[in-house]
Every structure is written in structure tokens, then in C-alpha cells.
Image: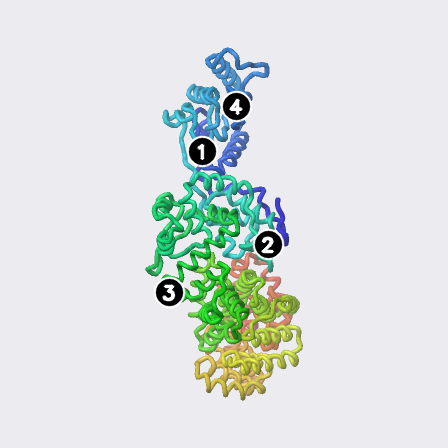
Amino acid sequence: MARSHEGPAVRADRWPLTGREAELGMIRSTLGARGPGGVLFAAPAGAGRTRLVREAQAMAGRAGWDAQWLSVTRSTSAVPFGAMSGLLPVNGRTGGGTSDGLRRMVRAAARRAAGRPLVLCVDDAHLLDEQSASAVHLLVAHGLVALVATVRPDEPAPDAVDALWRDGLVRRADLDPLGATEMEALVDAALGPQVETVTRRELLRLAAGNPWTLRELLAGAAADGSLAHRQGQWSWSPSGRRYGAGLRAPAEAAFAALPEPERAVLEVVSCAGPLPWAVLGRLAQAGFLDGGAVTAAGARGLIVQETAERRRTARPGHPLDAEILRTTLPAARVLRIREVVAEALADLPGRRRGDVADRASRALDAGAAPPAATLLDAARRASAGPDLMLTERLAGAAHQAGADTSGVHGGWIRSLASLVVTGHVDQARRLADEEYEHAAERLDRGAAAGWAACRGVLAKAQGDLAAARSTLVEAAVLADGTPWAGFLLAELAATAALTGDAEAAAGRMRQAARCPEPPPLAGPWIALDRAWTVAAAGDLDEAAGRARRAAEAARALGQPAVEILAWYDLARMDRPHEALAPLTVLADTLTTPLSAAMARACAALAAADGPALDDAAAAFTGFGLSVHAAEAAAAAVRAHRDLGTRHRPAMYASRARLTAILASCAITPRTPLLKRDDDLAALTPRERQIALLVATGLRSKSVASRLSLSVRTVDNHLGRAYAKLGVSGRAELAATIGGRPARPK
């Protein structure tokens, strides 16, 4: 068991046996026959051969077999009958020649098999000495033993071992690499499910279905501290990696066997890839690479060619070997490679949207100092996208070169606010989900961080608080150490505040305060997040003041989309009269459907206009803003109720809408407008959950099935809810909190 420098232990010492159901079935078939025969598994190093044979030995013991493990090593392969010592009599000798030894082996096995069936378990049977291999073949051929064995297909085996499957005495089965699902199960066994996506994808890609490789990666990453537990998630940092000797030794041996020109090609692609295939041609023309070696490296699989958007790119054929090669090269060699690649790229036309930023970044990698204007242009282009790390790197370099970068940071967040205010949140979330998946698949941590941030901010805006929490945590982990980390932690604080968890909100905000100073455009967002954190603690006066200041800061920075969100949040903090005038002016300026809906909702809140609030709840539902819709519906319930008995039907209809909205939320929001909904405030979370479901017409048995509870437990919670709400049955419950109870059948 290894331990990272932070967080819980990495359990890389024990693996579940997964993904080998077919092979276990072959073993069960062999043992079930209660006779000779067997199975020979062929697989490369690290595929789980030893674990499989150990499992066979345990299965045989449980089934009543005499399971004999033959110890086979390279040292025993030099000793005649060296692996068979366990079958020899205690005073037995191998003298007398091979024939005599075989006869004695057969007699010893026959005596053992007379008591109960005998199975030989042989790991690495290709290392058997010739005499032991002949003995195993003879014992199987005479029906004295069953066999479960493994070999490596890339190493020669004695003829007697190969004859076992060629002669049909045993079945041969090749162990395929484990699939992604099985490898993910191993990652979860070692780390648990809380692993950020890029780390998980990179581990799976480098391990390539090999359990031993995965174990070595995890053990080495925990030992060197590059794998750490941050914000409740495991993350594997690209810096500081030191791959263990078990991984390095075979890779370095393979590198040493390569012709020098082909190794040079692999070094270039490992240090600078993926890169346009045309760069390899330019480097060959310049004499830095050998053109024939480029072709040979492709044929050997050292590098592979991919085509995307009509551009051919080169990347390493074996990602783990390339990683190891890059970490073992002298720093001067890596720098020289990056220098010549940057020069070759500069000679190629840059037609793609990201080419300018990519080339500027590569120039910095090579230790070059591009002009300030070039860096500023690259930073501005990068800021239009969500790659947080690339933008900050280019902007920082431009600033050091003397450029004014005040307008560079955070262009993506301005666009995000505009998307929210236009009401296209659903479409924006779908786009962010797709782009995040693409970035994670490319192992592009910067872009993944940006798209994860977009996903989290949009989910929070829609009131999908469970999704917001998980995606913002991942974004914060990926952006750790950048100026955006504080913004993301502040958004996490506001997410916790919207659930009513004041303690968690305050904790996240304290974490945000310890981060590097965020870009100026994030200031109004963070101020608004602080307002929600204070509101969750119950100080609405202070919260309202912070929301006003957030709106004013957004106006000063020319962010009308953020400003209108801040003014409406002020209304949500039970200050609609203060927010109405500026919000109405902004809505007239922005002329978007959602800004107009916010202005109408604010007016309805200020007037306690029940029908207008019902309309606002319906409008927010249409925009996919569930918390906004729930708040409007709750305010409508109060407005109708305050008008007396004659308005009870309208109150029940508003309550039904509120019930349906809250039932759709994975995490129930607890905002100031919802906390005023006193009918449900007295209930525990479980009582509230059951009451809302029963109010929609579900019977106790259906509720119990949905929540994995007993019917008795559901009825007990329901009885306590009745007492707290002052109702005597399902009909009165539905009338109080909405819905129509189903009639008993």
C-alpha cells in the first residue's frame, strides 16, 4: 500500500480479479471434468497470468483437488527437473538420467492421484527446464494430472510445452487486454470513484488494458507525489512524475535496441507531439531527422498518423514508452527538440483557429522570447476559448514582455454570462458537455478545466446543484494553482449556499480567499458568490448589500449580462423593490427573453402578484432554471394564500407546480424565497422527500420501492409529516402542498 503526499492511501497492493469470466469458466470446466486435460493461458507480462493461476489453485482446493503449485523461475530452468521437486519423494534424486527421472515422476504422481485428483498449476511454463516440461507433458498425456498453466507468447517455450496444445491435450487461450470497464474497476479499487476524468482517462490510456502496468503507474505516482487528493478528488499532475524502475527498465531496453535515426524520430514526437505530420518532413529536409527513419518508425508503430479536420498529425504509438522516454532525456535535448519544432511550425501556414496560440506556447516551451505583440495576440485568441491554462500562460508571458493584458483574461466568462441571459442554457450545457468529453479524450487538461468550469457554472445557473457541485469540484482540481481556482471555489461556495449548507459555503469561500488573485472579470461573480454565502448564514441585509455591490462592479466592468443576474439575485434575497428599477432598465437594454422574464418576475415579487408569479414560474421552467422557477412558485403560493379562502384553488395549483419542480431536483434548494415556504420548512429532508412524492399520488409501496425503504418506514415518516403540517391524511396533504393523491385500489 502506498500513500500520496496528500489524502487517503492508494490501495495498489490488492486487485479484484475482473474481466476474466471466460477464463474462469475454462478453469471450472477443467475442474468439473474431474480428470486430465486443462488449459494453457498465453499473455504478455502484466496481463494477470499469475493472479489467474493462483485463483485456479484456490478453486481446485475448494473443489477437493490436490492442487500442486510448480515454482518456475529463470534460475530453476537451468536445473533438470528443477520445477518438479514438489512431486519427487523427499529422498528422491534426479540421478539416473532423464528416462529414470520421468518414470519416478510418473510413479509419484500416480500415488498422489490415487487419493484425490491432482492438478498442476504452472505460472510461466515457458521457463520450465526441458526435463520438467517433458514430465508435465507425460503426466497430462497419461491422464494422471490436469493442468492450468501460463506462457508468454513473446518468449520461446520448450517443445513439450507447445506440444500440450498442439496435440490437443489442453486448450490454449490468449488473454486479451482488459477492457475500459474492467480497468476502471481496478482504478476504483485502488482510489475509489472520486477520480477526476482526465486523470482516469490518462491512467487507462497509458496502462492499455494491462493490470500490472496500472498498478505500477499508481504506485509510482503515489510515491513521487504527482498523484494527490485535492478537493475530494484524485488528480495526477503532469509535473514531477518519476516512473518506477519496473516500468522504465523494459522501455529503456526497447529504446536501446532501436536504430539511432528511428529513436530520434520517437524523441521528437514524444517531446513535441502531437504535431502536424508536415513538421516531420520539414525536419527531415533540414537534416534534423532522417526521412527514411520517419517512414520506418511509422511502419514499426513507434509513431502513428491521425487525421482530423483535414490535418495529419503524428503522435507516439505507445504513449507510456513516449512518456518514459521524455522524462529520461537530458533537459538540453528536450529543449533543442522543442526549438527546432517551433522553428518548423513557424514556416508552415497557420490556418486553424488555435494555431497562433499553439505556436506561441511552443515557442515559450523552447525557451524563446516572442515579441510582446505576438504574445498578446495569442493570449487574446486563446481567451476566446475555455483553455484556462493556455490563456493564463500566454497572458503572463505577454505581461512580462511589457504588454497591457488587462482586457485579455476571462473572455469566456463574459460569453458564458451572455449565454445565460439569452436563455440558451440547455444548448450551452449540451455544447459544454460535448467539448468537455473531447478535451478529456485528448488529455487536454487546460481545455478540460475550462469546459468543466462552463458545465458547472451553467448547471448552477439552472439549479442543477448536484451536477454543479461535481463538475465545479473537477474544474477546481484541474485549475489548481491558476488564477481561476479561486473563482471556481467561490462558485462551489455559492452552490453549497443554494442548498442551505452555510458551513460548507463558508469553508469553500475561505479556500477561495487563499488562491491567487483572480482575473478582474471574475470579480463580480465572486462578489455575488459571497453574497449567497452570507445569505445562507441568515444575514440577508449583508447579503443584499453584497449583491448590490456585485451589480455595480459588473456595470463598471461593462458586463451587463452579469449585472442583470446580480440585480435579480438581489430580488431573490427578498429585496425586489430595490432591484426593480435597475433591472427593468437593463432588460430594456439587453432585449433578451430571459432578461425580460426576470424584470417581470421582479415586478411580480414586489407586488406579491400571484397570477404574475405563476407566469414567472412557468417562464423560468421553460428556460430550464429550476431554482428560479421554484422560488417564483413558492412566492405565488404565499401571494394566493394571503388573499384568503377564495384563492385556495389558485394556491393549490401553485403548490402543485412547486411540488413538481422540487421533486425534479436531485438536491432540494434552500434559498431565502424557498425558506419562507413555511409549510415544508419544519420537515426533515426525508419527511419532505416522502411528503412531496406522496402528494403527487404515489402510494406508500411505490415510494418505498423508489427510495429503497420499507413501507413501514415510509408510513412512519409520513405520519410525522402529517403531525407537523397539521393534516390528517393524503387528501389534506395534497391540498396543503399540492398534487392529487391516487385513490386506493
Q: Position of residue 628 (x, y in %)?
A: 52, 76
Q: Residue furthest left?
A: 310
Q: Is residue 171 visible in this depiction of the protein?
A: yes
State the mark number for residue 152: 1
Disc 1, SS: loop
Q: Which class describes the residues within 10 Å of circle 3: few (<14), some (14-19), or many (20+)?
A: few
Residue topped by disc 2:
228
Q: Earlier in the sequence, mark 4 or mark 1?
A: 4
Question: Taking 255 as reference, is 101 above or below it?
Answer: above
Q: Which class describes the residues within 10 Å of circle 2: few (<14), some (14-19), or many (20+)?
A: many
Q: Residue at x 58, y 77 (%)?
A: 673
Q: CA distance from mark 4 to mark 3?
A: 64 Å
Residue topped by disc 4:
83
Q: CA distance from mark 2 to mark 1?
A: 35 Å
State the mark number for residue 350: 3
Q: Are marks 3 and 2 in contact (CB under 8 Å)?
A: no
Disc 2, SS: strand
Direction from residue 594 to residue 524 in the image, left or right: right
